[in-house]
Image: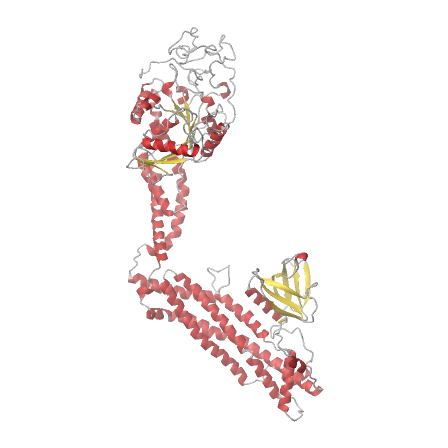
Amino acid sequence: MGNRGMEELIPLVNKLQDAFSSIGQSCHLDLPQIAVVGGQSAGKSSVLENFVGRDFLPRGSGIVTRRPLILQLIFSKTEYAEFLHCKSKKFTDFDEVRQEIEAETDRVTGTNKGISPVPINLRVYSPHVLNLTLIDLPGITKVPVGDQPQDIEYQIKEMILQFISRESSLILAVTPANMDLANSDALKMAKEVDPQGLRTIGVITKLDLMDEGTDARDVLENKLLPLRRGYIGVVNRSQKDIDGKKDIRAALAAERKFFLSHPAYRHMADRMGTPHLQKVLNQQLTNHIRETLPSLRSKLQSQLLSLEKEVEEYKNFRPDDPTRKTKALLQMVQQFGVDFEKRIEGSGDQVDTLELSGGARINRIFHERFPFELVKMEFDEKDLRREISYAIKNIHGVRTGLFTPDLAFEAIVKKQVVKLKEPCLKCVDLVIQELINTVRQCTSKLGSYPRLREETERIVTTHIREREGKTKDQILLLIDIELSYINTNHEDFIGFANAQQRNTQTNKKRAVPNQGEILVIRRGWLTINNISIMKGGSKEYWFVLTAESLSWYKDEEEKEKKYMLPLDNLKIRDVEKGFMSNKHVFAIFNTEQRNVYKDLRQIELACDSQEDVDSWKASFLRAGVYPEKDQTENEEGAQENTFSMDPQLERQVETIRNLVDSYVAIINKSIRDLMPKTIMHLMINNTKDFIHSELLAYLYSSADQSSLMEESAEQAQRRDEMLRMYHALKEALSIIGDISTSTVTTPVPPPVDDTWLQPSGTHSPPPQRRAPSIILPPGRPPAVRGPTPGPPLLPIPAGGPSPFTAPPIPSRPGPQNVFSAPPDPFSAPPQIPSRPARVPPGIPPGVPSRRPPAAPTRPTIIRPAEPSLLD
C-alpha cells in the first residue's frame, strides 16, 4: 500500500474526518462504499463475517438477506455494535446482533420472505477491523416464494442497482466456484453499471467444494473469463463448521492452509484469501483518498487564506487584557469616523450599488426636495393681484394716488420672503434624519461591543440635535437679514421702468428662475396606473420630460412613441397608495377639465419609491408644471375675486406684480445657494470634526473602558468558532500532507477483453461450435467421486502438457461448473482468448454437444487431479 500500513493510515483518515466535521459542510471526505452482490447461496454472508471476524449474520435456506444491510466497520480499541434504529443501545454479544437484524427485517417485511429496499444501518467497532463501509444486498432470485411479489427478480435487481450505480462504490461480485461463471448475475449487473471494469472485483467462493480433479486456477489467474481487476478466491466455513461454532479466526487459518497446500493455488496463495481481499479493498480506499486530496487541499487552502486576516487579531487573544481593549477602542472609534466621512463625502472603494448612501441622499434633499418645497409655496396669481391692490389702496387711504407706491412693493415682498421659513426648516429636518440614519449604519460595525455601540450612537446623535438648534437659528437669521433691507439696486432687479414696459400677459410655462430652458429635463420608467383592465391594465412606459411636453415610448430606445402630452395647463396632485399596492403614485391633470390621455381626465403615474416620486415632481417643477393648490377659499373670498379695478390701478398692480416676481426670484436664488452651505458648515462638517476630535473623550467620560469594551456573547462565540475552524483547517492540511507522503497509488490495471460477459438484461450467448470435449451422456446418474472409466486418452500434441483423464462425474446434481474441465481450444499455457465468442459458458448437465465426439481437430486439455494435502 505504501510506506505505511493501513493500520497507520486509518487513524490519519479518522483525524481528517474529525477535522472536516469541525470545518463544517463545505468539506468532507466521501469514502467509497463496497457493495457485495451475488446470488442465493453464493457465500456473501461468510465474506462479510470474515471482514468483521465475528459470526453475526442470519443464516438459512432460500433468500435470507431481505433488506440491504449497510455495515460500517470502525477501528476502535473496544468491540461492540450499534444500530441506527436503536442507537442508544450497544451490543457486545454478536448473537444479539443477529437476532436484532432478523427482528428488524421482520418488522418491515413480515415473516414470510417479503423484501424491502429500506436499509438496516449497523456499525461495528472493533480493534480487528479496517475502516470500511460494506453493503450486504439481497441475493438475486428468480422464483417468488411466500409473500414475495411476482416481479421479485426485477425488484431485487432495481434495489441492487440503486447502490452499485454510484460512481464512488466498489462492487464485490461474489460467485460460487460450482456455478457457471459466464451466467453470473452479479457479474452481469456489475458490467451494466461499470462497463470499464474499474470498480468491479470478482470473488470466487466455495473453492473447497469443487469436484475432485477440477480447479479454478485459470480463472483466478485471470486467464479464462478475465476481469480488469481480476478475481480473488476465498474459502468460507461450511454449514457443519457454522453449526459447530467454528471460530472465524480458525476458519481463516484453515483458508490459508488450503491455499498453501493445494497444488493448483499454492503459487498464488499470497494473492488469495480474505486477508488479501481486505488488503485490495483498502488499497482501493487509499487510491480514492489520494485522488480526492488535491481538490480538498485547494479548497482548504482557499478557506485558510480567507480566514487568516480575520484570525490574525485573535491568535494571541486575551479577553481581559487592558492593552487590547484600549487598542480596540481607539481602532473602532477611528474606523467609525472614517466610515461616517466616506458615507457623507463619498468614496471610490466599497461603493454601495443597492441603495443611496447618506451623502447622496442629502444631495437629493439639497437639489430636488428643497427646490420642490420652495415652488410648492408659489403664490396664486389672483390672490397676489388682490393683495397688491389692497396694499395700494390702504397706502393711499382716502387719497387717490397718482404714482405707484413702493411701500406696497416692500409689504408684498416681505410677506413672500417670510413664507420661505417653512421649507427651509423642513430641509434642515430632512438632513438631520439622514445624518442620524448614517450614524446608525456606521455604528452597526460596533456590534461586537453593544455598550460601545450604544454610547457612540447616543453621543453623536445628541451632538447632532444640539447643532440642529444652532443651524435653524442661522437659517432664520438669514431670512431675517433678507427682510431687514430690500435691495432694489440689485443688478438682477428689473426696476420700475422695466416693470412698466414688461408684457402684462402671464407666461404660464415659466421655469424656476435661473434654471433655464433645458431640452430634456428627465428620462425614466413610469407606470400608467389607471388604465382599465379591459384596455390592458397598468403598463410601464419610458417617459421623456422636456420643457414643452411629456412623451412616453414603448422602451428606452425611444423609437416607438405612444403619446406626446403638451404641458400647457397641467398640474400635479398627490394620489393615495392602493391598499394592496406597493407603488407610490402621483397624478397629472388639466386645469381646464379636459381629457389628458384618451378618455382619462388625469393620468396616474406610479414609481417604486417615494423618493422617485419626489424626484419626478421636482423635474416637473423645472418644466413649469406646479402642484395643485388647496381649495380653501370661501364664498366671501370668491365674491371678492370679482371686484373690478380701474385702468390706472390695474397698471399699478401689474407693475408691482412684476417687481415682486423679479425680487422674489433673487431671494430664492440666494436662499437655494446659502441653505446647503449653511447646513454643511454648521451641522455636517461640525459633526465630522466632533467625531474625529472629541468623541473619544466623551466615551471615556461616559463609562469606564472595561464596561465599554465588554464583548457580546455572539462575538465571543464567533471568535471561538473562527479560531476552531482555523486550527481545524491547518490540522486537515497537515494530515493531507502526511497522507500524501506516506502512501502511494497503485496504477489502474490495463483493460482486458471481457466481451464474454454480457450486461444484465441480456441472455448468455448460446454455445458456439467448439472442439469436441468428453461429456457425460444425457440422463446418466451420478456416481461416486473418483475417476470413471472413459474413452482412451487422446494423443498429446507436440509440446503440449502431460496426458489427462476424462472429467470426473459430479458427486451431486446441479449445473456443471465452469471450472470443471472447461474446453480450451488453445495450446498450453492458457491465454486470454482473442475471440471471446469461441469461449462459451459451461454446458449444463444433460445437454449434448452440438457435434458428436468424433475425431477431434484439436484435443481438449484437462488438467489432471493432483492429490491434495488436505486429503
User: How many tags in the picture?
Assistant: 0
**To which quarter of the image does residue 454 belong?**
bottom left
Q: Which residue lies furthest to the bottom in this view?
A: 399
Above or below residue 624? Residue 323 is above
Above or below residue 562? Residue 1 is above
Q: Which of 616 and 148 is in front in this view?
A: 148
- In what quadrant of the picture does the C terminus appear? top left
Residue at coordinates 47% horizontally, 10% vertically from top-left? 777
Residue 520 % position (x, y): 63, 66
Scheme of image coloration: secondary structure
- In what quadrant of the picture does the N terminus appear? top left
Above or below residue 393? Residue 204 is above
Q: Nearer the viewer, residue 137 or 87?
A: 87
Residue 447 % position (x, y): 39, 61
Q: Nearer the viewer, residue 52 or 494?
A: 52
Q: In this view of the protein, can residue 779 be seen by the observer?
A: yes
Above or below residue 592? Residue 391 is below
Residue 833 % position (x, y): 47, 20
**To which quarter of the image does residue 460 belong?**
bottom left
Q: Which residue lies furthest to the right in this view?
A: 647
Residue at coordinates 47% horizontally, 34% vertically from top-left? 162
Residue 800 % position (x, y): 42, 12
Q: In this view of the protein, can residue 835 be seen by the observer?
A: no
